[in-house]
Image (spheres, coloured by chain):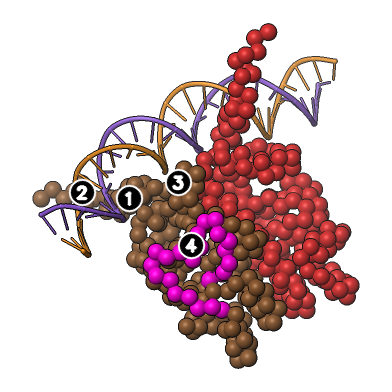
Chain colours: A red, B brown, C purple, D orange
Amino acid sequence: MFELLFQKLEEKIKLTEEEKKLSRSFFVPKKLRKKQYLLQEGDVCKYVAFVEKGLLRSYTINDKGQEHINQFAFEGWWIADQFSFLTREPSKYNIEAMEDCELLLLSKSSEDEMLDKIPKFERYFRILLQNNLIATQKRLVSSLSQTAEERYSELIQDCPTTLPHRIPQHMLASFLGITPETLSRIRRQIISKKAPHIEDNVQG
Amino acid sequence: MFELLFQKLEEKIKLTEEEKKLSRSFFVPKKLRKKQYLLQEGDVCKYVAFVEKGLLRSYTINDKGQEHINQFAFEGWWIADQFSFLTREPSKYNIEAMEDCELLLLSKSSEDEMLDKIPKFERYFRILLQNNLIATQKRLVSSLSQTAEERYSELIQDCPTTLPHRIPQHMLASFLGITPETLSRIRRQIISKKAPHIEDNVQG
DNA sequence: CGCGGGTTTGATGATGCTCAAGCCCGGTGG
DNA sequence: CCACCGGGCTTGAGCATCATCAAACCCGCG
């Protein structure tokens, strides 16, 4: 259950066997079935979750009833509503399992204690947050300055295999901040750009 | 010169006098005149800067030549291109002083040494990044799910005094990802919504 | 006074949304 | 085995939002 976690940890920090053993004790394993929720809007986010297996999404619903996906979390990623977790205020996000999941949960008190007893984790989480911030800023800039087509093209360029394979189109649309209809039309346009001669020249 | 920095530090971590003295040595004071640059596109971001005084903006220019402001940094804030600072790759951002500034610069090697010698800073930067991430995620969601008018209204609701006072409209527009013309029209609409009776009913 | 920037205003067009319908395909039950 | 259902993807027509281009305006400053 902890294999992937320790593998990921070792990429950033070196833990002694002692520390590994101790750190295990702070996590609570949890399995989620597809469509079950780790967090629902209005609840306080009590855990940050490390994804050992499966796939989750975090999304909000705005006043017009539209869903907007904020983040996906694949194997080896962390997911939570940082704001609610930190402040203990009710969350505006929902975190749902898109596939059957195996998670390692870390409560606020466990995190605090772990950071106290194994300060190396301060560094680990700092690096994690830094990378997350870099990625989020990049996404923000692209959402402000690029067209939907450009954003979609870049997205599938970054993850040409996993994304279309494990995530249905209407959720990619929601992630990009566009409607499923628009995404469908964009895909058609891209295809006709790539092979503009096919429809025109193949005449038998 | 270090007053504001230590004030901000004390909100998050407790430093001994020894540590304060030591930490000073890692920073290099720097003054910038209005319109001078801390970082220019194509250069590697060599410093994270703490703003003792003044105001800066970080922006990118996309392929169509449009500027998009990524971040402002007021007194007490930090600013850098985290990605370039971390990877030493050339930056895609420009960081420019919007007013005369007094900064405290921290180079990568100084940061590393400081984190080594005063591990409390790991925690400080972790908290900093956490707050920055929360804010950036919020901005991302609003840029994906709200209209320009909604985003502008929320922005000036959050900072009704400082923002319009110190930041010209066309830069607010760039921050919101809209054109100056659109922002101007939005402002007019908001005004006429607030007092719809004025034009209609005052007839002499 | 005239210049130059920032802001405003207008006309037109592109991008993406809404609503509505049709299609495709896998799953279910008769 | 097939008919039916439902969800996801596609397609179309019309519309809202926002960008673009161009011109006017406003105001501080040399």
Which amino acid is tagged 3? Gly
Magenta stretch, residue numbers: B27-49
- Total of numbered circles in the picture? 4
Disc 3 target residue: B65
A54 on left or right of A95: right
- Residue A7: in sight, yes or no? yes
- Residue A44: in sight, yes or no? no
Along the polypeptide, which appears first: circle 2 or circle 4?
Answer: 4
Residue C23 at x, y percent in the picture: 65, 20
Q: Real-space Cα distance between discs 2 and 4?
A: 43 Å
**Residue at image location 45% in from the left, 46% down from the top:** B65
Find residue C29 and report its image quarter.
top right
Is mark 4 in CB contact (under 8 Å) with mark 3? no
- Vertical position of residue A94 compared to residue B39: above or below: above
Residue A73 at x, y percent in the picture: 71, 52
Q: Real-space Cα distance between discs 1 and 3?
A: 21 Å
Mark 2 falls within which chain?
Answer: B
**In the image, which is nearer the foreground, mark 1 or mark 2?**
1
Is mark 1 in CB contact (under 8 Å) with mark 3? no
Along the polypeptide, which appears first: circle 3 or circle 2?
Answer: 3
Which amino acid is tagged 4? Ile
**Residue at image location 50% in from the left, 44% down from the top:** B63
Disc 2 target residue: B199
